[in-house]
Amino acid sequence: MSHPQSYEILLIPQFTDGKGADASGTGRTIRSAVVEATGATGESGYPRYAGEGMVADIDPATHTVEAILVDGSEIDYGLTVRISDRPVRENQVQDQPVPENPVPEASVPENNTDG
């Protein structure tokens, strides 16, 4: 069986009500990573994927994360892990960060030839 070569994993806070039951909805994604197949099988028996600080065993049939380490540690209670609904394409271009204080074009000094 052929396994997907990469997934995007989303780390999301899961809210509960006062009784400990899952509340409706979840929080916004607090971290994501594109993980790629390593060719190894994890302790859970599922294919191992790694990238951007995450190592995960993922069931390719159900797209379920069966085990995960984030920066070498287990995730805290109250966080949940999901696979992104959108497929990860080969050679996907990552968004470039926007500078915090970009210089507007109008404020760029022009060459002064007055001497």
Image: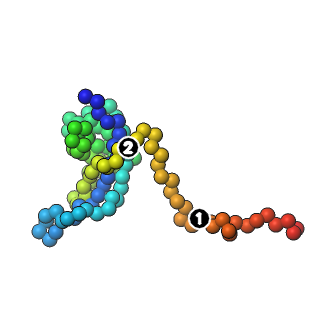
In screen coordinates, is 96 left or right of 57? Answer: right
Identify the residue position indicated by label 1 in the image.
102
The percent position of residue 41, horizontal first and vertical second, equals: 26, 33
Q: Nearer the viewer, residue 78 or 111?
A: 111
Seen as rendered, the residue at the extreme front is: 86
In screen coordinates, is 99 left or right of 113? Answer: left
Observer able to see residue 50: no
Please tell me how many numbered marks the rendered image carries: 2
Amino acid under label 1? Answer: Pro
Q: Residue at x 24, y 55 (%)?
A: 80
Image mark for residue 88: 2
The percent position of residue 17, horizontal first and vertical second, equals: 16, 69
Amino acid under label 2? Answer: Val
In screen coordinates, is 113 left or right of 57? Answer: right
User: Crowding at label 1, few (<14), some or many (≥20) Cα neighbours within 10 Å?
Assistant: few
- Is residue 17 depicted above or below 43 in this figure? below
The percent position of residue 8, horizontal first and vertical second, equals: 34, 47
**On the rendered image, what quadrant is the C terminus found in?**
bottom right
Marks 2/1: CA–CA distance: 30 Å
Q: Residue at x 48, y 46 (%)?
A: 93
Q: Residue at x 87, y 69 (%)?
A: 114
**On the rendered image, what quadrant is the N terminus found in?**
top left
